[in-house]
Image: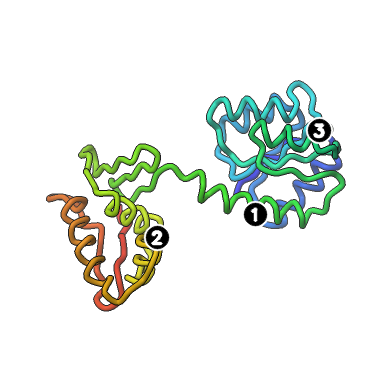
Amino acid sequence: MKVLIVEDEKQVLNFVKKGFKEHGFCVDTAMDGREGFFLAAGENYDCIVLDIMLPNLDGYEMVQQLRNKEIKTPVIFLTAKDTVEDKVKGLELGGDDYLVKPFSFSELLARVKALTRRGKEERKTHYQAGNLVLDISKRVVKRGEKAISLTPTEFTLLQYLLKHKGEVVTRTMISENVWGYDFDSMTNVIDVHITNLRKKIDLEGEKPLIRTLRGVGYVLEDKK
Ligand code: CA
């Protein structure tokens, strides 16, 4: 996990940096908003810990500029200002959470962990395995250059398999997560959909991606 800390108070910066390092994070730091912005725009961070009152560019402006550039890294504000308006303003501008100074590192860590977990679910725009790509927002599936037309159920099924690529997915898991319920009679329904999906994505000359584990379920392979 990689985190960016933007904070101009040296003491707070060192305290937070030390805490993250002790917990195995990669840490980059900046002491003013402009430098923080350039780092945030140029690197892939799992989370940004952002002070509000900063030289050159304040935390509000920084998050606003990042969101304008479609950079959606989760942001947690560190704020000495504890009025409701300030908190709301930060969230309205595109921040994800805030923590009022003084705070304990364990609380910051818990918030960052929650945020990055949530971020991974919500911010995912596509899934990939080998040369198969599923784009969630455009609802497009491609194997190499070839676009593949899927029914909505096949799309959701493939998305679920991709989300768990390399893992064994049982029929019960599929029926509960793709159909939303589980019946014994679902087995046939799932097998038929898997067969159809296979015909569409495992094109001639390409490496088959969906493997059946007899009596267990399926694995979507991710071999290069
Ligand atoms: Ca400050």
Q: Residue at x 31, y 65 (%)?
A: 219
Q: Quadrant of ligand 1?
A: top right
Disc 2 designates what residue?
164
Q: Amino acid at mark 2?
A: His
Q: Amino acid at mark 3?
A: Asp
For the residues labelled 2 and 1, the Cα–Cα distance comes to 21 Å
Within-10-Å neighbours for mark 2: few <14, some 14–19, many 20+: some
> In the picture provided, is 22 more to the left or to the right than 183?
right
Image quadrant where residue 41 sits: top right
Whether residue 27 is situated above or below residue 9 in the rendered picture? below
Q: In front: 74, or 175?
A: 175
Picture disc at residue 113: 1
The mark closer to the camera, 3 or 2, is: 2
The mark closer to the camera, 3 or 1, is: 1
Residue placed farthest to the top in the image? 56
Q: Residue at x 69, y 37 (%)?
A: 91
Within-10-Å neighbours for mark 1: few <14, some 14–19, many 20+: some
Q: Position of residue 204 (x, y in %)?
A: 12, 50
Q: Position of residue 98 (x, y in %)?
A: 74, 43
Q: Amino acid at mark 1?
A: Lys
For the residues labelled 3 and 2, the Cα–Cα distance comes to 41 Å
Disc 3 designates what residue?
8
